[in-house]
Amino acid sequence: MKLKQVLINIIGNAVKFTHEGGSVDLTVERTAQFDKKSTLRFTVSDTGIGISKEYLPHIFDSFSQEDSSATNKYGSSGLGLAITKSIIEMMNGNIEVRSEKGKGTTFTVAVTLMDSERRHDEINELVIDTNNMSVLVIDDDPVACEHAKLILEKIGIACEIAYSGFDAIEMVKLRHARQNPYNLILVDLKMPDMDGIETTREIRKIVGHESAIIIITAYRWDDVLDEAISAGVDSFIAKPLFANNIIEEFRSALHKKNSSKSAKPQTDLKGRHILLAEDVPINAEIMTMVLAMRELNVDHVENGRAAVSDF
Ligand code: ADP
């Protein structure tokens, strides 16, 4: 709860002091692990107004603000960072700030916490090698394509673009022929001529199940869900796209594929005892035969009363 308060304060400031068109990034890293504890480093960087060299040493003082008009302009009190710093110190952590006037600010918070008892989600353990991942984005809207490309390339994922289902099919065929299929195909749902579902159906004919296909849409998808799934869609993502949503959905699509591929191991029931209550003799006979094939021992009785009484 306290950590959340710290991050909300720092990220809130970053958003507040960054003008439209700028960006705010949060990264979390585990920098050390020992004795069931982990040190986490949170880095919040913005491309905002920055902080002057003169003010920087006072940034954590109570009621301090670089620009007192900020009280009115940004609705600030100058208390947030003083409180933030004291919370972090109570957690034996530390907070640092680097900034350049007009360029932006980076706050780094490091805290050492007990590892959670909670087990990792199996899905999250699927490691995705983003460097070797290739993505095809299919969308008739060039701005949407550009946006997808931008956010994917920012996290190191190579991305190609097709402005229609027809173009996409040609690109998929080419990759398939070169045995270098796209790992992930993002398809816009609503496109003229050939929509996302039809495009998926055609792509599936070429690639089978080797690529994950995710529909991206600004609309509701519940009314097309069944049709999309039977066309071979693995998942859906709402626009605007965020890199981590794409990775999460990709990961869960892979997980689904992997778990359906590895057939569940047959449980060995050999030698177990089964009590069968069945009044129709022929049914009982068939059941006994089927169970005996798995080397199960069957006691047959004719009804429930007999089943619960000692025999
Ligand atoms: P408040 O935001 O309520 O004024 P804080 O203690 O959180 O109080 O911040 C104190 C001052 O530090 C802010 O008024 C601002 O001048 C400066 N500041 C904090 N974060 C940033 C940032 N990301 N970019 C620029 N200035 C910042």
Image: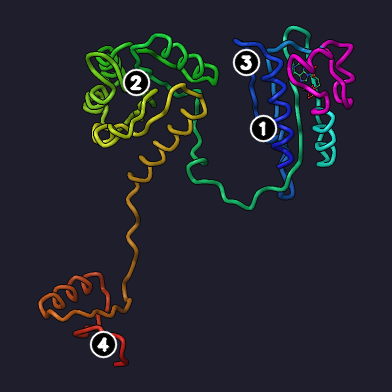
Q: Amino acid at mark 3?
A: Ser
From what the image shows, is residue 286 above or below residue 45?
below
- Do the numbered discs 3 and 4 sit on residues whose CB atoms are within 8 Å? no
Circle 1 is placed at which residue position? Answer: 29
Q: Position of residue 164 (x, y in %)?
A: 29, 13
Spot the residue most to the bottom: 311
Circle 2 is placed at which residue position? Answer: 188
Number of numbered discs present?
4
Nearer to us of marks 4 and 1 is: 4
* Residue stretch rendered in magenta on the structure: 52-80
Q: Which of the two labelled residues, at mark 2 and mark 4, occupies the earlier sequence position?
A: 2
Residue 220 in which image quadrant = top left
State yes or no: Cβ of the residue under disc 3 lies below 8 Å from any atom of ligand 1.
no
Q: Secondary structure at mark 3?
A: loop
Q: Which of the two labelled residues, at mark 1 and mark 2, occupies the earlier sequence position?
A: 1
Q: Amino acid at mark 4?
A: Arg
Q: Amino acid at mark 2?
A: Asp
- Do the numbered discs 1 and 3 sit on residues whose CB atoms are within 8 Å? no
Q: Secondary structure at mark 1?
A: strand
Circle 3 is placed at which residue position? Answer: 23
Report the Cα–Cα distance between label 1 and label 2. Answer: 33 Å
Q: Position of residue 288 (x, y in %)?
A: 19, 76
Query: Where is the C terminus found, in terms of image quarters?
Result: bottom left
Residue 2 circle label = none
